Image: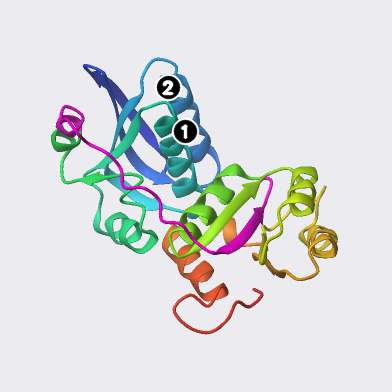
Amino acid sequence: MPLTLNTRYCGSVYVIQCTGDIVLGDAERTLDTALDHAERQFQRFVLNLTGITRLDSMGLGLLVRHSLRLAKRGGALRLAGSPPFVTKLLDLTRLSAVMPNFATEDDAILSFMERGYAQPAAAKSARRLLIFDPSPDLCTFARSVLSSRGFDVRTTCAFGDAKLLLRVDPVEYILIGPGTPQIPAEMAAHELAALAPGASVLQLGADFKSRDALDATQSLIQMFGIGGGSPASA
């Protein structure tokens, strides 16, 4: 279902009502452009997701990326009216701390008026992981899922930067996205593994970007053997 956006502002809060699918392609670009434009003037955002029928991993990564960017500027992005499948996804990914979810649009707007609101500090982790993929939304999505489960994650969308990071910052795991014609995943895996011979190298399947966010989250959890077992390639 095509994504449509209805926008307005309420005081210092910018509200975007989303209807349809937030998925890879035109929908993701439309929402990304709308947020980029609005962030020139606003720092507080409410996304009304009552009318959302689908959210894939790239769409969720986009929301998290904007939320983190706003937080660095002292702002925030909050969700409202999320359907049950989005609420379940937020619980599974543990992203409610990054993007608080409210029952109604009014509740989300009013929450910005409350004093003393603060997001909990991110938990420190021990297992060091590098994520490389040209897509910032894929990197954001994977980082959000894995950092909440005990990984110390760094990400990069530039292959040269990935190689540089491995030279100065040793890791235990390397996660490589589906790749592009310019940088095939197999080539990236070979070159990065050579720079970190002690690291376990995992690759995401070619269909990862098109998976629903819930399915993609569960796939990542299984790949890294979280909750039991050991990491395995996909």
Q: Which mark is residue 81?
A: none
What residue is rendered at 38% in x and 52% in y?
54
Type of residue at label 1? Arg
Is 104 situated left or right of 217 in this image? Answer: left
Q: Which mark is residue 39?
A: 2
Badge 2, how many Cα within 10 Å: few under 14, some, many 20+? some
Mark 2 residue element: loop
Q: Earlier in the sequence, mark 2 or mark 1?
A: 2
Check whether the beta carbons of the residues at disc 2 and disc 1 lie within 8 A of each other: yes
The segment highlighted magenta reads 109-134
Q: CA distance from mark 2 to mark 1?
A: 10 Å
- Residue 216 part of the magenta segment: no
The chief SS type of the magenta part is loop
What residue is rendered at 44% in x and 31% in y?
72
Is 71 situated left or right of 33 in this image? Answer: left
Q: Is residue 93 visible?
A: yes
Query: Mark 2 against mark 1, which lies toward the viewer?
Result: 1
Badge 1, how many Cα within 10 Å: few under 14, some, many 20+? some
The x, y position of residue 201, in whole percent, is 71, 68
Q: Nearer the viewer, residue 84 or 138?
A: 138
Type of residue at label 2? Glu
Q: Is residue 211 visible?
A: no
Q: Nearer the viewer, residue 58 or 192?
A: 192
Place residue 6 in its image quadrant: top left
Q: Nearer the viewer, residue 88 or 29?
A: 88
Q: Which mark is residue 69?
A: 1
What residue is rendered at 35% in x and 58% in y?
94
